[in-house]
Amino acid sequence: MLKLRIITALCLVPLVLAALFLLPFNYFALFAGAIFLLASIEWGNFIDKDRAFITMLAMGLVLYGLMGILPLEGLWTESTSLDTLAAGMEPRLSYLYMVAGAWWVVALGLVLTFPRSASWWRGNAAMQSAFAFLTLVPFYWAMMTLRGFQYQENPHFGAWLLLFVMGLVWAADTGAYFVGRAVGKRKLCPNVSPGKTVEGMLGGVASATVLALIVTFSIDLPSQQTIVVLIASIVAVLASVLGDLTESMFKREAGLKDSGNILPGHGGIMDRIDSLTAALPVFVLVVWLLS
């Protein structure tokens, strides 16, 4: 199994990097849209396996409809300043991120009180579909917001920014794994994910913080922007843990070990992006609030 996971990862990393740095913005939007639709199918399995395709179709229509309200071209900016990323954000888009932030606060409550919390959404397809919307739609727009940042002036600037946030999550996952295996004792959320420990989470946050410090100081950001990026990074990493736990909660309630089987050795798309669904919109939200 470990060998299969490594082989799949070695195939995925070049694919992700190629999509980030080689695809023009509009084609990257299609690539991100494909991820969104595949994740929607898997979320449909959490609700009703027999109607997973209907969930994907509904989510696709919602995404397409929102593109008429929040055109992707409006995400582009010509400045390299993170202050401009916040100040220049389309107002309706900022509302989307505030809703996303509120959702992750609610999700925290659901996770902490699981399985009692499941009693009021178990078997409620409409509510679970709303959870899918609140998780996946802001995730998609956060990808596009970061990837499209300063695109007209430097097409790769946003790619590096998006890769930075993704790298924070990967660093946190790696740090949590090794620290958890070495010294993990206290269970973080045993009713949802018995394998995760408090020590592992702290190790992951520490690993991601080190990465954020290295990156921010190596590119010599102004002191105020450095503080904003560091705070946003730490909050995003904490949110990534919540994203992982939230998906684990829905899988556990649905009786699933993995969200799918599209990625050999890894499970489904949601199993790979669960942390990012929270980290990306939360990072953008914190930058917007602090800038």
Image (spheres, rainbow, N blue to C red):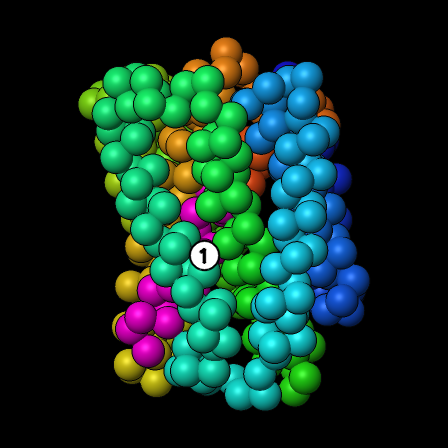
Q: Quadrant of residue 153?
A: bottom right
Label 1 sits on what residue type? Pro
Q: Residue at x 55, y 41 (%)?
A: 273
User: Element at badge 1?
Assistant: helix
Q: Residue furthest left?
A: 186
**In screen coordinates, is 190 left or right of 139?**
left
**In screen coordinates, is 158 left or right of 235?**
right
Where residue 148 appears, as percent x and y from the top left, is 62, 72
Q: Residue furthest top?
A: 255
Which of these two is toward me, 42 or 194? 42
Q: Quadrant of the C terminus?
A: bottom left
Where residue 97 appears, as percent x and y from the top left, is 42, 60
Q: Residue at x 71, y 65 (%)?
A: 21
Q: Residue at x 52, y 84 (%)?
A: 80
Q: Residue at x 55, y 67 (%)?
A: 146
Q: Quadrant of residue 39?
A: top right
Q: Quadrant of the N terminus?
A: top right
Image height of 185 relative to 164, above or below: above
Q: Is residue 261 magenta?
A: no
| Magenta stretch, residue numbers | 274-291
Q: Residues within 10 Å of mark 1 (few under 14, many from 20)?
A: many
